[in-house]
Every structure is written in structure tokens, then in C-alpha cells.
Image (cartoon, grey):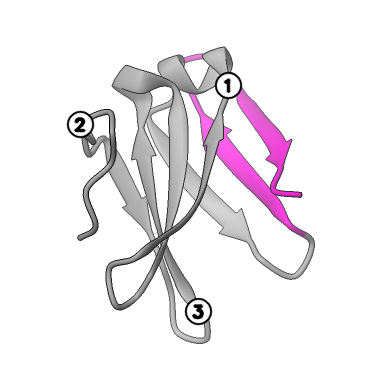
Amino acid sequence: FEASNTPIVFSATFTQAGTDFLYVLDATNGRLIRFEKSGAIVDQYANDRIKEAKSVTVDEKNKKAYFTTASEVFSLSLE
């Protein structure tokens, strides 16, 4: 994987058949990182709410990421 200025702490990952990217949840740093499957970083999405996330699912068609915490599910736009 491509290096990031801030070390990546892998909390969870998401990909599936038909998905062009691999998504890495870095809850420690409050971000979701989108990688090409070749390992290059495409985007990083930062939000303090991500620090509490335990898992992530991505809807690429609608450009949304869904996160679960110990007490809720929330979504963020990937635009």
C-alpha cells in the first residue's frame, strides 16, 4: 500500500466484487482511506465521528459510507 503522511492504523476494511476500490477504516486517526486495488491512495475522508467506528460499508453508487459504533449507525458522503 502507498504510504500516508500519518501512519495508517487498520481498524477494518471493506471491498466486494464489482467494487473498484478497497476502503480502510482508520478509527485511530478518524479517517476512511480509499485505495485503488493496486495500493495507491485515491482519497481520504476525515471526521471525528469516525474515531468511534467499529466497521464500515460503502455504497459506491450513492457515494456514501456507513459506519457502525457501539451505539449507532451513521453515514458520511464520499463527495
Q: Which residue is mark 1?
A: 47
Q: Which residue is mark 2?
A: 7
Q: Which residue is mark 3?
A: 20
Q: Amino acid at mark 2?
A: Pro
| Label 2–label 3 contact, CB within 8 A | no
Which is more N-terminal, label 1 or label 2? 2
Callout 3 environment at 10 Å: few (<14), some (14 to 19), or many (20+)?
few
Callout 1 environment at 10 Å: few (<14), some (14 to 19), or many (20+)?
few
> Is 41 within the magenta?
no
Q: Amino acid at mark 3?
A: Asp
For residue 30, side relative to residue 79 (left or right): left
For residue 71, side relative to residue 66 (left or right): left
Q: Residue at x 75, y 70 (%)?
A: 61
Q: Report the span colored magenta.
A: 63-79
For residue 56, side relative to residue 5 (left or right): right
Which quadrant: the N terminus?
bottom left
Q: Secondary structure at mark 1?
A: loop
